[in-house]
Image (cartoon, grey):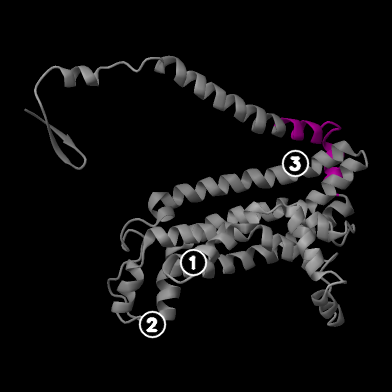
Amino acid sequence: MRDHRFEHGIVRLPPGRWFGRLKRLPSHGSSLVRPLLIGAALGLMVILLVLPLVVIFAKAFSEGLVAFFAAVSQPDTLSDVRVSAVVVAIAVPLNVLFGLLAGWAVGKFQFPGKNLVKSLIDLPLTVSPVVAGLVFVLLLGGESLLGRILEQAGVKTIFAVPGLVIVTSFVTLPYVAREVITHCESRGNGPEEAALVLGASGWQTFLRVTVPGLRWSLLYGTVLAGARALGEFGAVSVVSGHIRGRTNTVPLHVEILYNEYAVAAAFAVASLLVLVAVLSLWAKALLGRRAGPRGRAGAGTANDRGLGWEGVTWS
């Protein structure tokens, strides 16, 4: 009998030549299949990702640098950039707060309807943004009961910035929450239980143990939500009214320029969105490397995540 060590113990195999032959069995066709699969994947990546990026920047600079900078510095463009910045600056922090609380509640506790709550959080990923925008128009428009109440109170939502913030928050709602839920479920309740045993209160445990342990997931989800919010088109198009200088965002401005046959200007402004998308992917990859498998998945001990308990006083 021959002993062979594996990860989960020692397996005793009968003598004979069959085992040695088994290890040397050739994988028929592997030398041909592997390059074909890699080549197909690279080809699709070039066609779907690289070529569109090349076309966008080629069109953006097709009329020269002067025309490019003139397009991105137009008053309408700058105004729409400000509107997009305001929407992102409001919607993303709201989603971070919601994602933190919802992820903590769903990931750390068991309660009736938990699966339903998780499904509702994922709902914006399955609903068309255009449909979502129509729903909010019907819900908050001037002909609805809630819309009339808001108008009487002096609050205008549809065809105004608050409406843009609402639909953008809805569309980007799952990104932070999903990251936090996954982290909380894989991490378990060990650090929180240890803090409570050491005398920490509920708020101290949440603020000094739970939240610091979720920092990478929060940052990761924030990057995804920010990029998604900046590039949202469908839902925003429905509720904005396309009012230049007031409710237009950058994607809507690109559509208007293209419809007005200002193709080079449209691609010039679109290149700004592409640049933000590339920077978001770079930040996402950087956060993934910084967090590592333990930071993202929640594995390891409290000390591995910089949550050591030595000398901790809860006061």
Q: Residue at horizontal 51%, vertical 24%?
A: 38
Q: Nearer the viewer, mark 3 or mark 1?
A: 1
Quadrant that contains the C terminus: bottom left
Please give left or right for residue 225 compared with residue 194 in the image.
right
Q: Position of residue 1 (x, y in %)?
A: 6, 28
Q: In this view of the protein, which residue sits in the foreground, 133 or 303?
A: 133
Q: Position of residue 87 (x, y in %)?
A: 73, 62
Q: What's the amino acid at mark 1?
A: Lys
Of pointers 3 and 1, the one earlier in the residue sequence: 1
Q: What's the amino acid at mark 2?
A: Ser
The numbered disc on residue 146 is none
Residue at the spot of label 3: 271
Q: Quadrant of residue 4?
A: top left
Q: In this view of the protein, which residue sits in the foreground, 162 or 280?
A: 162
Residue at the spot of label 1: 114
Q: Nearer the viewer, mark 1 or mark 2?
A: 1
